[in-house]
Amino acid sequence: MENIFWEYWAKFENIENNIHRFDTRVYLKQIQKPSNNDICLGAIVGKNPGSARGAISNELVQIDLQGDKLLPTVRNIFENAYKKCGKEIPENSYIQVLNLFYLCDADLNNAIKKYENSTSKIDECENKNFPFIWYVWGGENKKLSNMKDRFNKINSKKHFYFNSRNDTINENIPSNIDLARHTQGMDQGKVIDYISKILK
């Protein structure tokens, strides 16, 4: 992709012929080049990277979304949350995207099979201390349970997820059997309202 201003950045690595995506960032304002000095507002945790791709590089590169809807949806939700609370979006600010595992494949079952039969690694960004973490990894899946357990040790004073079973925001790390609603098809209103209060 050309060297233009862009919102979505990550590092892509080929591990045993499987593409992995690390340090994924959703910038709320377009930037030309990311920096380690940029402001991480918080994090969101999904299952695994889907269809979005980028050049293999040790540096942050622009993400070609290729139909991936999570990243633009996250950006839109936070833009609306800032509008709702009446605050300006800080320059060079982004949301960190973490995953249960980092192998890229839009087909979750296929991704899990590849993951189970190959070498993988955890994103070093999980070692950061985040102002808040929003969980969107869905409901119970026994093949993902061990991966979820890892996040019980992540550094943040605020955890939340949207529980669509009772239509509420829960302020804790979801358990293996909790339903941490994905952004796809989610009623965004309550999440936008909740995030706007965090940002005040």
Image (cartoon, rainbow, N blue to C red):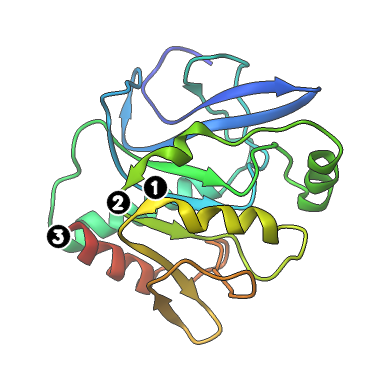
- Local packing at callout 2 (Cα closer than 10 Å; few below 14, some 14-19, many 20+) is some
Give the labeled residue for mark 1.
75
Q: Position of residue 49 (x, y in %)?
A: 63, 42
Q: Amino acid at mark 3?
A: Lys
Camera-nearest residue between 3 and 159 = 159
Q: Is residue 101 above or below residue 87?
A: above
Q: Is residue 136 left or right of residue 128?
A: right
How far apart are the two marked residues, 3 and 2, measured between alpha carbons? 14 Å
Evaluate if marks 3 and 1 touch, with contact meaning CB atoms under 8 Å apart.
Answer: no
Of labels 3 and 2, earlier in sequence is 2
SS for tag 3? Answer: loop
Question: Which labelled disc corresponds to residue 24?
Answer: none
Evaluate if marks 1 and 2 touch, with contact meaning CB atoms under 8 Å apart.
Answer: yes
Give the labeled residue for mark 3.
200
SS for tag 1? Answer: helix
Q: Amino acid at mark 1?
A: Arg
SS for tag 2? Answer: helix
Q: Is residue 40 above or below residue 19?
A: below
How far apart are the two marked residues, 1 and 2, measured between alpha carbons? 6 Å
Give the labeled residue for mark 2.
79
Which is more foreground, mark 3 or mark 1? 3
Q: Amino acid at mark 2?
A: Glu
Q: Is residue 168 left or right of residue 197?
A: right
Residue drawn at point x = 57 percent, y = 52 percent: 150
